[in-house]
Image: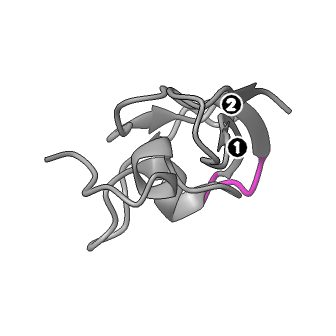
Amino acid sequence: MRVAPPTDRSAETPLILESVISCPECGSVTGETMPENACQWFYECRSCSAFIRPKPGDCCVFCSYGTVPCPPIQKGESCCS
């Protein structure tokens, strides 16, 4: 699992940058690396080519279909502002 170091040397918890996305169309699972400072609004399934968008109320595909929320949410920030 890829982990980003804290941006400063405080006791901050490192960000988890690896998440496994489950396709809501075909059920396939794929490990992906998330961008550190942004959310991802679209994802194309590598198995069935479905174009996936976040569920209503979620900021990104990782928060909707991933095993780990996006880095901005992990930091406790408002995502996609």
Q: Position of residue 63 (x, y in %)?
A: 49, 59
Name the spot of residue 53 as percent of width and height, x first: 36, 50
Local crowd size for mark 1, using a 10 Å CA cut-off: few (<14), some (14–19), many (≥20): many
Q: Residue at x 34, y 33 (%)?
A: 38
Contact? badges 1 and 2 (CB < 8 Å):
yes
Q: Rounded to the nearest whole Å, what is the CA distance between mark 1 and mark 2? A: 6 Å
Residue 19's label in the rendered image is 1
Residue 68 is situated, as x and y percent measured from the top left of the image, at 65, 55
Going 51% across and 28% down the picture, which residue do you hit?
8
Residue at 32% x, 55% y: name it. 77
Range covered by the magenta-colored residues: 23-28
Q: Residue 32 location in percent, x, y?
A: 68, 30
Main secondary structure along the magenta-highlighted residues: loop
Query: Which quadrant of the figure has residue 80?
Result: top left
**Closer to the camera, 71 or 52?**
71
Please determine whether, in this image, residue 42 is positioned above or below residue 63: above
- Secondary structure of the residue carrying tag 2 is strand
Say whether disc 1 or disc 2 marks the residue closer to the N-terminus: 1
29 or 64, which is in the foreground?
A: 64
Q: Nearer the viewer, residue 34 or 21?
A: 34
Residue 27 drawn in magenta: yes
Answer left or right for 67 relative to 50. right
The colouring scheme, among rainbow, by chain, secondary structure or one colour, is one colour
Quadrant holding the N terminus: top right
Q: Is 58 a magenta residue? A: no
Residue at the limit of the structure toward the front, as seen here = 10
Q: Which residue is mark 2?
A: 32
